[in-house]
Image (tube, grey):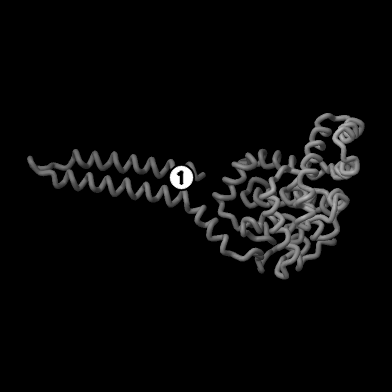
Amino acid sequence: MKKKIIFCLIAMLGFLSQQAFALRFRVRVPSGSSESSNGVVTWIVYAVIAVVVAVTLYRYFFKIRGFLRQFKGDFLMDENSSLSKEQQQKMLLGAVYAVIDKGYLNTIKTGLEKEEREDRLEKDWNICTHDSAVDALNGLKIACTKDYSPNIGEAFKLKEQKAIEKYLRDTFVNPNDAKACAKQIERAFKHIGNLVKEGIVRDEVEFSRIGGVAFEATRLVAIARMCAESKYISEQEMWEYVDFADEQAHKSLTSWEDYGKSYVIGDCLWGADSYDLGQSSKIIRKLINDPKSPWKLFPFEK
């Protein structure tokens, strides 16, 4: 959409220039006079400047709006939300994304501008139609069910690389699953020390007990919500994805605190670097500890 509008502005510039030159040839100027000619040229220059300014402002408008959102509070709640308390609680599964975006936490609308939202869906998720939205969201559903935390727990006990490799060969029939699990084990060993130091988990046992399901559940809720607001999927379809994420989260987690920790663990297992983990940890601490946090207002338990 943004590209189409910019193209239209450029086309308008071309049309105006064409009309200006046509006017120049139609104007009868006495020999030796350049006043009218100079006036037309000046008019063309003004038109060019106006269109360039318009294109520039349009391109940066949404970035400016996004920047201004940073001055809003951390927890933007719609007091007139049409959702039930249960539905709002489910929306809060995607709270991390909403806090990052300075958007609404308890409604279907995100607070993101249409262009910004749709550009992000297309750039980050290749979503621009109903079919592409369903494909991406179904992929996130599958990711919610890929839980290697018990295997990571066994790897923590084994410690040694050769023993872990043998365990993976004996455990997995599908080599792709073994490879995916091995990658998560590698990341778990890499970051467990920092996660303990930062107080996200007490030890390796808590790391494997909590697992990373909240990371995938958060993404599923947040992306389904954006797709529904952009009309790529219906609200009914959105709730099917949200309900699935809610079900998966409540299978192994019993509190917002564990859910928040699980998000950071999942971020770690997904491949985030130390800086990104530090940023997500800060957001989780706010959601868990801030008295104004919606996680304090809506219970996690059903």
Tag 1's secondary structure?
helix
Left or right: residue 113 compared with residue 141: left
Query: Which residue is at the front of the view, 119 or 239?
Result: 119
The spot of residue 38 in percent (x, y) is: 18, 45
The spot of residue 179 in percent (x, y) is: 80, 33
- Residue at image coords 44%, 44%: 6
Quarter of the rendering occupied by the C terminus = bottom right
Query: Which residue is at the front of the view, 236 or 209?
Result: 209
Query: Which residue is at the front of the view, 293 or 5?
Result: 293
Q: Residue furthest left?
A: 31
Q: Residue furthest bottom?
A: 291
The spot of residue 19 in percent (x, y) is: 27, 41
Mark 1: which amino acid? Ile
Q: Which residue does the numbered mark 1 point to in the structure image?
A: 5
- Residue at image coords 43%, 41%: 7
Is residue 91 something that shows in the picture? Answer: yes
Left or right: residue 61 compared with residue 163: left
Residue 286's quadrant in the figure?
bottom right
Is residue 234 something that shows in the picture? Answer: no
Query: Which residue is at the front of the view, 292 or 297?
Result: 292
The spot of residue 8 in percent (x, y) is: 42, 43
- Residue at image coords 76%, 51%: 194
- Residue at image coords 75%, 63%: 288
Residue 257's quadrant in the figure?
bottom right
